[in-house]
């Protein structure tokens, strides 16, 4: 029974990341590991403020690439200074979150900037 559920879930699963084709297999593996970690960490540390709810679905906004460039994110605004200091989200974790946000597939609904 478990097997059936698992195979159904995989059947429906869409590819959610978007790594450049020229990325080597070993780099890709490292990025994928980071990306998956980042996905969980984003949900834990960022989604509460940033995701938009539409009906029963939640959408992750598309952040401008230049805003995802570095650790400056921590100091971007007062909410960040309060909510995501190094003691809560380590630099390594922030890097994983940035990897997730940079390489996730932006669905059409996601690309509508919601402000
Ligand atoms: C306590 C609420 C809060 C949390 C938690 C939070 N943010 Fe933010 N964030 C904001 C606010 C408020 C802004 C400024 C308004 C905006 O652009 O949405 C912002 C802006 C940003 C921006 C710039 C967006 C732009 O368009 O200029 C990025 C990138 C960002 N946040 C990423 C993150 C990441 C990554 C995390 C988790 C590690 C996070 N935020 C956690 C409240 C939060």
Image (cartoon, helix red, strand yellow):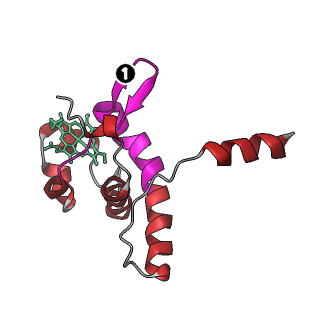
Residue reaching furthest to the right: 1
Please say if 88 is above or below 78: below
Quadrant housing the N terminus: top right
**Callout 1: few (<14), some (14-19), or many (20+) C-alpha neighbours within 10 Å?**
few
Residue marked by disc 1: 54
Q: Quadrant of residue 19?
A: bottom left
Please say if 54 is above or below 84: above
Quadrant housing the C terminus: top left
The picture places residue 71, in percent across and down from the top left corner, at 21, 60
The picture places residue 24, in percent across and down from the top left corner, at 43, 82
Dot 1 falls on a residue whose secondary structure is: strand
Q: Which residue corresponds to the image point at 35% horizontal and 59% vertical from the top-left? A: 103
Residue reaching furthest to the top: 55
Is residue 54 a member of the stretch shown in magenta? yes
Is residue 98 a member of the stretch shown in magenta? no
Q: Which residue corresponds to the image point at 17% horizontal and 50% vertical from the top-left? A: 64
On the picture, is 29 further left or further right than 79? right
On the picture, is 22 further left or further right than 61? right
Please say if 13 is above or below 66: above
Q: Which residue corresponds to the image point at 31% horizontal and 62% vertical from the top-left? A: 91
On the picture, is 62 further left or further right than 23? left
The picture places residue 9, in percent across and down from the top left corner, at 67, 42
Classify the position of ligand 1 by quadrant: top left, top right, bottom left or bottom right: top left
Q: Which residue corresponds to the image point at 37% horizontal and 21% vertical from the top-left? A: 54
Residue 107 or 28: which is nearer the viewer? 107
Asked whether mark 1 lies closer than 8 Å to ligand 1, one says: no
Q: Quadrant of residue 12?
A: top right
Label tally: 1
Residue 22 or 36: which is nearer the viewer? 22
Magenta segment range?
38-64
The picture places residue 15, in percent across and down from the top left corner, at 50, 53
């Amino acid at each position: 029974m478990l097997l059936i559920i698992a195979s159904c879930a995989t059947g429906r699963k869409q590819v959610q990341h978007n790594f450049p084709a020229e990325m080597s297999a070993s780099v890709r593996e490292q990025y994928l590991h980071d990306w998956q970690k980042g996905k969980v960490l984003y949900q834990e540390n960022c989604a509460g403020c940033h995701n938009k709810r539409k009906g029963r679905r939640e959408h992750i906004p598309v952040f401008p690439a230049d805003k995802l460039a570095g650790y400056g994110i921590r100091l971007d605004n007062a909410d960040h200074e309060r909510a995501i200091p190094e003691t809560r989200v380590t630099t390594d974790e922030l890097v994983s979150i940035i990897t997730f946000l940079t390489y996730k597939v932006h669905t059409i609904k996601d690309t509508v900037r919601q402000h």
